[in-house]
Structure formats: structure tokens, C-alpha cells
Image (spheres, rainbow, N blue to C red):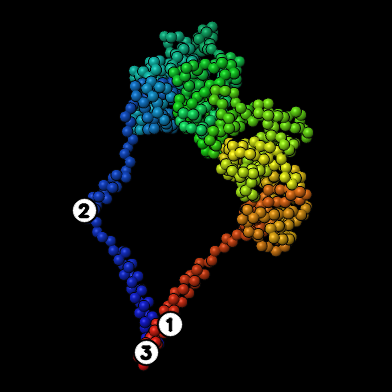
Amino acid sequence: MLGKIFSFIFGVALSAGLFLAVGTLRAEVTTPCDCACQCQNQVNTNQSVPPPPICQNLDLRLNELVSDPVSGGSEWIEFFNIGNGTIDLKDWTVEDGSGRKTSLSGSLGAKGLSTVTKPSGALNNSGDIVILKCADTVVDTVTYGDWDDGNTSDNAVAAVDPYSLARVQDGVDTGSDIDDWRVTQTPTKGSFNSITALASEDEPASIPTEESMLSQPSDTASETSAAPEPIDYSNSIIINEVLPNPVGADTTEEFIELKNISTAGIDLAGWQVADAAKPYTIAAGDFATTNVAAGGLFLIRREVSGIALNNSGTEEVFLFSPDGAEQDHLTYSGTVAEGSSYSRTADGFVWTPDATPGQENIVFDVTTENTGEDAVPVENAADGLVIATVDTISTVPSGESVRVRGTVAVEPGVLGTQIMYLQNPNIQIYFYKKDWPALALGDFVQVTGEMSESKGEPRIKISATEDIVVLSHGQSLSAQTVEELGEGLEGSLVTVSGQFTERKSNTLWLDTGQAEVVVYLKTSTGIKAPGFLPGTRIQVTGIVSQNDDTYQLLPRDQEDFVLLENETKVLGVSTEKPAAHTQYAYGWFLIIGGLGAAGWFMYRRMGSSADHSA
């Protein structure tokens, strides 16, 4: 009987092995590809190759350049669309004699001008060649100074600081650089050229050399080398406000606002604004006027400039004067909340929910009646609110209407459905209705409400969802390291380290060596009480909360507990996995167990059959 059983089991195993082997062999058999198949594969392969770039409009020309900028300025190259159609610039590049290329981007309308500031490489002051290409097609060049292109007699004259080299007639190319280009003492970056000769209208200006200076009478040299004083553009125009993520269409509502801080009116034609991806030169034809009075504002919308400001990540905005010098720039990062503008204040730029295109900025301005420890906030005359900051929040009495700005350190629902916490200033926000807006850790928000207190802990009560306005996202949070909890730390995000001494239900005690710290686990956090022996050193992060005369630490999640002997291990969470050999043992156990069960089943059936036959 046993022989029949083992024969049966062996037969089952052998059949299973043959089944798997045949399946494997069948999987390895491939059907030969006939001619039609191969041809189809060839077609599919050819279709995956992208077509080469096609330059359908070659009407772009070099028009003006600065190779020797003023001190603190930048090199720039200007282009002119001589045609009547729009040119897509995605396949266009400009390069110097060293072969360093700068890619153009965007598009340029008929008879339009565009400028590249700070092109790759560096244009030689004494002489160079500038090459304009569409894909691999050379469309235009200009050779100036002592650059040897095989015929130096045809070279245009090099322009020295503070002058530019410009075409005599915008976009007109006769094939002779020395005839088509002139040094002008009036750079017109982004505007049509104005040739103001250095010496005379009949002779091209040249770079004075030591020999030429010595060969001239001293009075003549003084007369011909005299040049007008360069214009001082500094301390005249600044970036005042930007709106990256407006409510509504970004393409029409985004803007960059400039302000004239000088004491005289200024014509902004030829000035340039740019982000990291695209420059725009202010052109007189794009606005009713480009003149800005002293103290006046000038608005440049995205539909005019083509500059798309980033709604997330890092963005930089630059302002260049007509001589190519950088006059101002700003940088912001994170995720921009819809409707928030980045506005200039006396202390720098801040995010505000009140965009003011073409008007003076409405900023979060804080004033005090006096300074020092007794400083108290003053009501904002515009709306009757007390504007509180990190330094003044503790001085605001209960019942006062107050407005603060801070970073979300604990979202609603974590430590209670009706509360959340801000950092800088450190304060609890209470909302009875619990109808919170969408909030996340690191959101920078503005909160308007009423100052109050609960069990000794200060907080701000709000009455409507609209009382919280998200200004930006992605702000960093950092916990303050302390050894004891007490007055002045309410609402603060802190970290304590010490020895676990005792636990009762959801309350734990830590001995920091300085004081005994009470740690309370709120059920709303879902934290599992860590199990460890008294004397174990741990680190706990959380919010300081006051409950009458007791100060306690409220952790936010499981990651707020760290075992100090192994700071990568979070208490209460198992990160161990079974070893590979253990997993294999489980597999063999299941296989052998399954075969044994099958054998026992067949044995009983065969025994039962024998009994019946008997």
C-alpha cells in the first residue's frame, strides 16, 4: 500500500515538473518574422525618428550689440525681424568666435526687436565675430575689430565702453560690415537704432590707439576723443511688485510692476525686464506711453512681455537699464498661492493677498508706540486691526481684533478638529465651525480674528473660512531645542531629549536633567504609545500647550519620537523584514506540507475503497 502512495505522489510531482518544463519550452519558441512583418517593423522604427528642425522664416537679423559694457553692466545682442510674419525662435542660436552658443526662445512679431542679455561666452572687446543661425543654417554675421575672418579690411569698428555697435539702418545688410555698422554713443537696447557718431558723420569712429594719439596734435586729440558723460541709471527705477499666480487667466493677469524712485520723469523705452527663461525690452509701440513721472508706477503684463512667472519652485526677475547694467532683481521660491503678489516694502519683499497693479502696495506694515520689552502693537488705521508679530503677539489683550502672518506647524484635525498651530508667531488658531480651508504644513498664511485664551494658553478665534488666506506654500519649519517647558513657549514647536521615567495611559514623563517634561498623546494623532523600559533615552518633538498650571508637549505623529541610541529608528514602528533564507524556508515548508496533505488524502481514499471492496 505504501508503495502505491509514494508512486502516486512521485507521479504528481513528475507531472507538475513536465508541465512547467513544457510551458517554459513553449514560451521560448518564437514565431519567425516573415517579410511583411520585417517591413512593418522597419516602418515603425522609421516613424519613431523625430523630423529634423525646419526653419521656415529666415527674416531675423543681428541689429545691435555691446561687447564692452560699462562697469557692472552686461553684454547684450539685439535682433530685428525684418519680415511681415512672426518668427518662432526655438531653433535659433547666436554664437561668438569661440563657438559658445546661446539658444533663443519664444517668438518675435513682424518688425519686432528682441535682446539676449549675458550671452554664453564673452564677446572680445578688441574684436570678434557674432554668428546668427537657424538650426545649422548661418543667417547673419557681423565681424568687428581685429577678428581675422580672412578679410579684416571689411570688419566693423569695435565699440568701447560705454558705446554700442549698431546697424546704420535697422536690419539692412549690404554684405559689408564696415559700411553697415557704426559705433554709436547712444545705445538703444530693445529700440530702433539711433546713430550718434563719435567723430563725424562721414567717418566711422575707431578705437583710439597709442600711435594715433601720439600722431595727433594735443588739441585735436582732446577734441575728437571727447565723449558725453554716460547716463547714470542707478537709483531711478526698481521692481515694485510681481503677480505670478493671479485669480483668473495667468496669460492676461500676470504682471511685473516697476517704480520710478527718482525726482524726475524717465522714459522706460529700452529698459529690459527678464526672468531666467526670457527677456523683454520695453518698446514705445507696446504702450500708450513709456514715460513715468517721479514716484510713478509702470505696469508690464504677461500678454505684452511674454514672461511667464513660475508658480512653484524658484524664480528670479531682473531689471536692466538700456546700457545693459543690472539695476534690480528679486528672487522667490516655494508654491505661490493663487492671488498672492510679491510686494516691496521698506524692509524687502513680502507676500500679500492684496495685489495692487498700478497702485501703491498694500503691505503688512507693523508700527509700535514704543520699542523694547514694553512695545505694544498699534491699530492699523485702515481696518481697525491690531497687527501682531513674533515680538508683539504676547502683548495683545483678549478681545482685540488681531491679524497675524505665520507658517502652519500643525494642520487642523491633528491635535483637535477645532484647532491648528502657527509658527512665527507661535499661536493656536481656534475655529468653532471647523470649516477650515485646505491647509498643509509649511503654508504661509494670514489669519484675522479675535485674541482670546483657553486654560491659560493664548489663541486667536476666527469666525469664517475667509479669515485664513494662504499666501504661499513650502516654508521651512524648525523646532527649538529646550530642556523644560514654561511661560512664553505656548504654541511653540520644540524638541526635548531625556530619559523615559514613567507612563500612565496616554501620558509619559521624561527627565531632561533640567526638569521633568510631561508628554501627552492626543488620540486624534493616531500615535501608538511606544513601549520601552524606564531609563531609555528618547527625543520627542511637539507643540507646547498650557493646561491651567501644567505645560505639556503634544507630539504630532509617530515620527516625533526618536530613540537616541539609534536616531533612524522611530519608536512604535517596526522596520524589520524577514531574512531571505527565512522566506525560502517558509516556501519549502509550504511545498512539503502540501505534498504530505495530498498523500494523506489519497491514503484515506484508497483505504476506504479497500474496506468497501472487502
Question: Quadrant location of residue 466?
Answer: top right
Residue 17 in the figure: left or right of residue 587:
left
Q: Residue most toward the left?
A: 35
Quick check: 587 left or right of 149? right
Q: Secondary structure at mark 3?
A: helix
User: Compared with residue 108, is residue 422 higher up or lower down, i.e. above or below?
Assistant: below
Q: Residue at x 33, y 27 (%)?
A: 57
Going by the numbered disc 3, the residue's amino acid type is His
Secondary structure state at the residue bearing disc 1 = helix
Task: Report the residue at 61% width, 37% height from top.
Answer: 467
Identify the residue at image location x=57%, y=40%. 473
Of badges 1 and 3, the one in the foreground is 3
In the displayed structure image, the side of residue 68 where residue 432 appears, left or right? right
Q: Which residue is mark 1?
A: 600
Residue type at tag 2: Cys
Disc number lying in front (3 or 2): 3
Q: Quadrant of the N terminus?
A: bottom left
Q: Of label 1 and label 3, which has the lower sequence position?
A: 1
For the residues labelled 1 and 3, the Cα–Cα distance comes to: 19 Å
Helix, strand or loop at label 2? It is helix
Residue plotted at (74% across, 36% down): 397
Question: Which residue lies under the disc numbered 3?
Answer: 612
- The residue beneath circle 2 is 35
Q: Percent position (x, y) of residue 107? A: 40, 28
Q: Is residue 247 above or below residue 420?
A: above
Closer to the N terminus: mark 3 or mark 2? 2
Residue 572: percent from the left, percent from the top? 62, 60
Real-space Cα separation, disc 3 to disc 2, in angstroms:
66 Å
- From the top left corner, tell me how far across and down residue 7 is, in percent: 36, 83
| Residue 357 visible in this rendered orientation of the protein | yes
